[in-house]
Image (cartoon, helix red, strand yellow):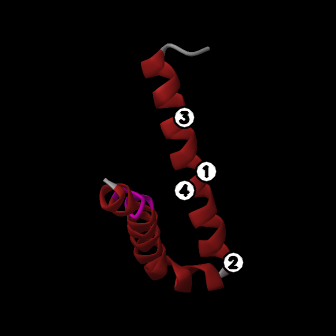
Amino acid sequence: MENFWNTVSKYPVFVAGTILGVFLNAVKPLAPLLRNPVTAIALGGVAVGGFAFIAFTLRAMLGLQ
C-alpha cells in the first residue's frame, strides 16, 4: 500500500510538467512577435479579448450575474 501512495503522489508533478510544457510550446512561436511594439500590443489585445470572451461565455453558461 505504501508503494501505491508513493506512485500516486508523483502524478501531480507529471500533470504540472505536462501543462507547463504545452504552455511553453504554445508561447514560444509568439516570442519574436513581442519584439515589435505594434505586434506586442496586438497580441496583448488578442489575449485580453480571448480572456473576456471566455469569461463572458462561462458567465452566460453558468447563469452568473
Counting residues from the start of the chain, the first of labels 2 and 1 encountered is: 2
Q: Which residue is mark 4?
A: 46
Asked whether, in this view, residue 40 is left or right of residue 5, the answer is right
x then y, percent, for residue 35: 64, 85
Counting residues from the start of the chain, the first of labels 4 and 2 encountered is: 2
Location of the C terminus (image quadrant): top right
In the image, residue 36 lies in the stretch drawn in magenta: no
> In this picture, is 40 found above or below 54?
below
Question: What residue is at 42 percent from the left and 20 percent from the top?
Answer: 61
x then y, percent, for residue 23: 45, 68
Q: Dot 3 lies on which element?
A: helix
Q: Which residue is mark 3?
A: 55
- Circles 2, 3 touching at the beta carbon (< 8 Å): no
Q: Dot 2 lies on which element?
A: helix
| Amino acid type, label 1 | Val
| Amino acid type, label 2 | Pro
Q: How many marks?
A: 4
Q: How much space separates mark 4 and mark 1, taking CA atoms?
A: 6 Å
- Circles 4, 1 touching at the beta carbon (< 8 Å): yes
> In this picture, is 63 found above or below 59?
above
Counting residues from the start of the chain, the first of labels 3 and 1 encountered is: 1
> In this picture, is 58 found above or below 36?
above
* Range of magenta residues: 8-12
| Amino acid type, label 4 | Val
Q: Residue furthest right?
A: 37
Q: Nearer the viewer, mark 2 or mark 3?
A: 3
Residue 16, label in figure: none
Q: Dot 1 lies on which element?
A: helix
Q: How much space separates mark 3 and mark 1, taking CA atoms?
A: 10 Å
Q: Which residue is mark 1?
A: 48
Q: Which residue is mark 2?
A: 37
Q: Dot 4 lies on which element?
A: helix
